[in-house]
């Protein structure tokens, strides 16, 4: 009887552990904290597709666009309503770290979620409409210097967010003394920002190369500067860097995921492992090359430490340019 009972208990435990392990794959979901067409949307959709193509998940990942507050609406949703979901991951980036660093998610901090892994780094770009007379970054910044009210720059993060900071970093490097005079208009995602650029409502766009590429390919915009240390290769080789135009401005937007703070250790470890396998695959290397993503291979605790350091660094930058006190 005791042996039978013990076997029954072990079987029940094995079944329970199996259910926990499977829970991460059951109806997998990724929240993109912006409207379709931006970098977070790209991250969810491309990673979800690649995970399924590689057999790392056996169901289609549902992508939910939850825009608002520069990612704050999605962050609050996860913390307050989805805290114990094992099947949920959320696209994150330097924009997420920026908002957390500046206290822009009221009542929320980075330690309320679990940071999973990175999938690469996305260099910033500054672009204009394809038919714009502006051809170089110095030309754009000269117009801002001469009359800051005449130029508006659109981006997919909130005021003070990462897209905003990239323009301010470039302006500061060019010698614009009061970068707070640079007009920045925030939209819920890079796609919406580009739409406003094409409508003529703004004169420039700040975003990341992955979200800009489709609009370049369609002939809608032209990239006048990539905020990378040197020219990228492949399809991006024709895009000039800010540095080669005499402006020492570099800005890389990491891309990755966080999970609910109450996610089980089993599900967390499974997601970390799956994203790590994805990153190591030849298929993901092709995705990175096609979309201008630079290497950034961090999982689990290493990624957690990296995000903490990012938040601290952005707080310092934000104080220097007067975004926070």
Image (spheres, grey):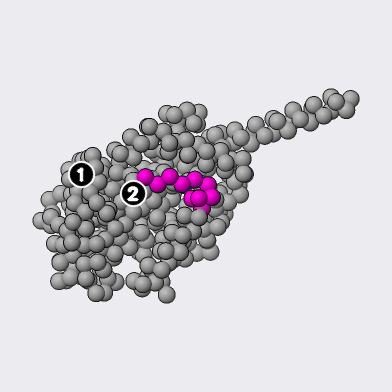
Number of the label disc, if any, that sits on residue 237: 1
* Image point (64%, 33%), residue name: 19
Residue 266 percent location from the top left of the image: 61, 40
Q: Secondary structure at mark 1?
A: loop
**Mark toward the start of the polypeptide (2 vs 1):** 2
Residue 163 in the image: x percent, y percent? 32, 58
Q: Residue furthest right?
A: 1
Q: Say which residue appears at 43% left-offset and 67% top-offset.
A: 315
Q: Position of residue 201 (x, y in %)?
A: 21, 58
User: Considering the image in quadrants, where does the N terminus appear?
Assistant: top right
Relative placement, left or right, of 318 versus 132 is right
Task: Tell me which segment is drawn in magenta.
Answer: 295-304
Query: Could you tell me which quadrant the C terminus lies in?
Result: bottom left
Give the numbered dot on residue 122.
2
Q: Nearer the viewer, residue 258 or 274?
A: 274
Residue 61 magenta: no
Q: Residue at x 21, y 54 (%)?
A: 241
Across and down, in percent, residue 146 comes to: 15, 71
User: Considering depth in this image, is 25 or 176 the residue closer to the camera?
Assistant: 176
Which residue does the image show at 24% across and 62% down from the upper left? 248
Up/down of 267 relative to 123, above or below: above
Q: Quadrant of residue 293?
A: top left
Indicate which disc residue 199 carries. none
Dot 2, how many residues are within 10 Å of its Cα: few (below 14), some (14-19), or many (20+)?
A: many
Q: Is residue 157 visible?
A: yes
Residue 199 appears in view: no
Please indicate whether residue 279 sits to the left or right of residue 209 in the image.
right
Q: Helix, strand or loop at disc 2?
A: strand
Separation (CA) of disc 2 from disc 1:
15 Å
Q: Is residue 123 left or right of residue 218?
A: right
Is there a contact, CB below 8 Å, between mark 2 and mark 1? no
Can residue 299 be found in the magenta stretch? Answer: yes
């Amino acid at each position: 009887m005791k042996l039978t009972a013990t076997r029954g208990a072990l079987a029940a435990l094995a079944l329970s552990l199996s259910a926990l392990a499977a829970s991460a794959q059951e109806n997998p979901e990724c929240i993109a904290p912006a409207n379709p067409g931006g970098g977070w949307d790209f991250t969810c959709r491309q990673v979800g597709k690649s995970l399924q193509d590689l057999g790392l998940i056996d169901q289609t990942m549902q992508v939910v666009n939850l825009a608002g507050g520069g990612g704050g609406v999605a962050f609050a949703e996860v913390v307050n309503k989805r805290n114990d979901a094992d099947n949920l991951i959320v696209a994150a980036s330097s924009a997420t770290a920026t908002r957390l660093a500046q206290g822009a998610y009221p009542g929320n901090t980075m330690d309320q979620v679990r940071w999973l892994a990175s999938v690469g780094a996305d260099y910033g770009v500054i672009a204009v409409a394809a038919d714009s007379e502006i051809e170089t970054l110095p030309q754009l910044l000269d117009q801002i210097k001469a009359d800051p009210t005449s130029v508006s720059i659109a981006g997919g993060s909130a005021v003070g967010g990462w897209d905003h900071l990239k323009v301010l970093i470039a302006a500061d490097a060019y010698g614009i003394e009061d970068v707070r005079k640079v007009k920045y208009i925030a939209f819920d995602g890079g796609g919406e920002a580009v739409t406003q650029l094409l409508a003529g409502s703004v004169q420039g766009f700040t975003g990341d190369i992955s979200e800009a590429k489709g609009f370049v390919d369609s002939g809608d915009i032209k990239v006048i500067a990539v905020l990378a240390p040197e020219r990228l290769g492949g399809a991006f080789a024709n895009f000039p860097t800010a540095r080669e135009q005499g402006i020492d401005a570099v800005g890389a937007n990491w891309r990755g995921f966080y999970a609910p703070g109450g996610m089980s250790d089993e599900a967390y470890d499974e997601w970390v492992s799956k994203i790590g396998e994805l990153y190591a695959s030849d298929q993901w290397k092709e995705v990175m090359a096609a979309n201008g993503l630079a290497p950034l291979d961090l999982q689990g605790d290493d990624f957690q430490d990296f995000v903490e350091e990012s938040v601290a660094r952005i707080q310092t930058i934000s104080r220097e340019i007067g975004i926070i006190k």
